[in-house]
Structures are given as structure tokens and as C-alpha cells.
Image (tube, rainbow, N blue to C red):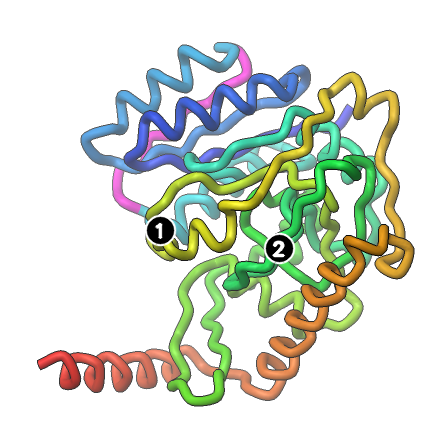
Amino acid sequence: MPKKTITITAMERPALFADMVASLTRCGLDRWHVYVAIEPGDHQEALAQIAMDLLPSDQITILRNPKQLGVRENPKAAIDAAFGDRSDFNLCLEEDFLLAPDALQLADWYIANAQPHWVCLNLLAASCGSTGNLSAPAYPELLFESKGFSSIGLGLTRRNWDQLRPHWSAPTAIRRKGYHDIAVDGWDHALFAHLLKHPALRSIHPVAARCTHVGATGTYCTPTFQDAAFGHIALALRDADAAARDGFSLVPIARLPQQIVGHVRAQQDFANLLAQQVTRFEPTRSYLYDRLSHWNRKRRRRNQ
């Protein structure tokens, strides 16, 4: 049996974290080990206690960060710890997510069926920076290959991690008409850029969401974006037993239900347009920092 792990990054929201862990326990944690990476601060011990109260004691490792790693380096360090302990698959989560009851069964399907051109499993059919997220709970069995990438529930085999890890902290930028080039330091944008630059690579997305985001604020999230991107997301309701009985089905986009296929094609069009920008513009780290500094100086002058 492969060694399967879950990493959860946490920092400052005990109530949301408790809800997230409770949703995870309803998925059935048999043969899964959970790493909880907690940033230093006033809530570190409270978050650790919640994890120890709700999760099986022999299936949990608490990682108390001695220094602040941030939203980019904390999940990377946690995933490194999991694969360093001989994990074969890792599901990367954050403290302000909620999971569908059969989320881990979808992860098991991905482990059993992983293909060389698959770069990851996403638990939500979405793309970074877009509010056009998809969830159709009436179709819990349907999956499709996508050029999109979402950080809302990221599943990685060891092979996937070996491929993506070198790009985790890569500088990225997208040239938008009418705007300056703005450096993006989020790891999700960096991995999305890697996926966009390689036409053969695909992620696997479910038609019915297995994960959603519930934190109204965050490093890169505002209440307005939260409501637009996730306010309409309904999680799949199928439990673990039903998922094991009925399974999952990977289908071409053209064979998805008519009321779904248009949404998915729009997601792919969005990714293809971004790919044209990303592949035309290969920024260096020094260039990005120079452009971001220039943009910040102009913004400060405008606000004076």
C-alpha cells in the first residue's frame, strides 16, 4: 500500500481550522497520516491542541515552525517533510478549507490512475486568479483533464512533486493590457505558469467540488473575491462508501453534460489566453523586482 499523507498549513484562525479538521475526519482517515504545519504566534498552541483533539494520535505529526515561513514557504516545507518521510502521495490543504465527504476517495483514484502527463490533482475545478470556479454536485463521478490550476486542495504523487518543486518559488508575471507587469510571489501562480508553459501537461479536476475556501480574508483574498469565487460553490455530497461503490469516470470535455461543458471550455479558454502571455514573456527575478518597485513607487506618489 502506498504511504498517503495530508499536509495542513495553519496560522491564526482556530475556529476555521477546527471546522476544516472536522470535515477531514468525516472523509475517513484510514491509512492516511496528517502533518499540521503551524506558524509561530499567539494561536500556535491552540491550533496544535485542536489538531490533537480531533485527529487520531497515531496519525498526526505537529510541525511547530520556529520562525514565520509565510504562505509560500510553509506549505513547501510541510510537503518536503511528508515526502522526506517516504510518502508516496500528499494532499496539501490550508486551515480555511472545507472538504467533501469523498475527497480522499478521489485522491485514491488519482493515485491508482496517475498518468505521466498529469502534473497534479485539484479538488476544485478552477484557475488561479479567476472567479469562474465550477461545482455541479449532481455529477459526483465525473472528472476531466484541464489546463487550469487551483491551490484549493492540491494532490501530488512523488513524481508530481519532483517535477513541480523546482518551480514552487519561481518568479512569475502576466502582462495585462492597460496594467504594469506586477510580480506575483504566490506558489500557486508559479506552478500554474509552469503548467501553462508546457502544452502536454494536464491537471485533473472534478466536476463536483471536493474542496472549497471559506476564509473571507487572507494574504491574497478579499471578501469581495471570496464571495465571487467561492460563495456559490456547493461541495459534493457523496460519502466514502458511495464513492467506493460508484467510482469515478474521466471523460473528455466534449462528453461532459451540456450544462457543464460550456463552463469548462470557458475555463480552458482562460488558461489558453494566459498561456499565450506567459510563454511570450519570460521574466527574470531581478526584472520582476525592478518592475514591482517601479509600480510601488508610482502607487505611493498617486496616494500622496
Residue 171 location, x and y as percent?
45, 71
Left or right, 130 with respect to 43, comes to right
Q: Quadrant of residue 2?
A: top right
What kind of element bears circle 1? helix
Q: How many marks?
A: 2
Residue drawn 48% across the image and 55% down it: 228
Type of amino acid at the residue the image marks with label 1: Pro
Left or right, 211 with respect to 266, comes to left
Residue drawn 44% across the image and 24% down it: 19
Left or right, 195 with respect to 45, comes to right
Q: Which mark is residue 126?
A: 2
Label 2, residues with CA under 10 Å away: few <14, some 14-19, many ≥20: many
Residue 177 vs residue 57, the one in the foreground? 177
Residue 242 vs residue 153, the one in the foreground? 242
Residue 250 location, x and y as percent?
86, 46
Residue 304, placed above or below residue 62: below
What residue is shown with label 1?
223
Residue 16 location, x and y as percent?
38, 30
Q: Quadrant of the N terminus?
A: top right
Residue 64 visible in the snapshot = yes
Disc 2/disc 1 C-alpha distance (Å): 18 Å
Residue drawn 52% across the image and 32% down it: 98
Q: Where does the magenta region start and end? A: 58-68
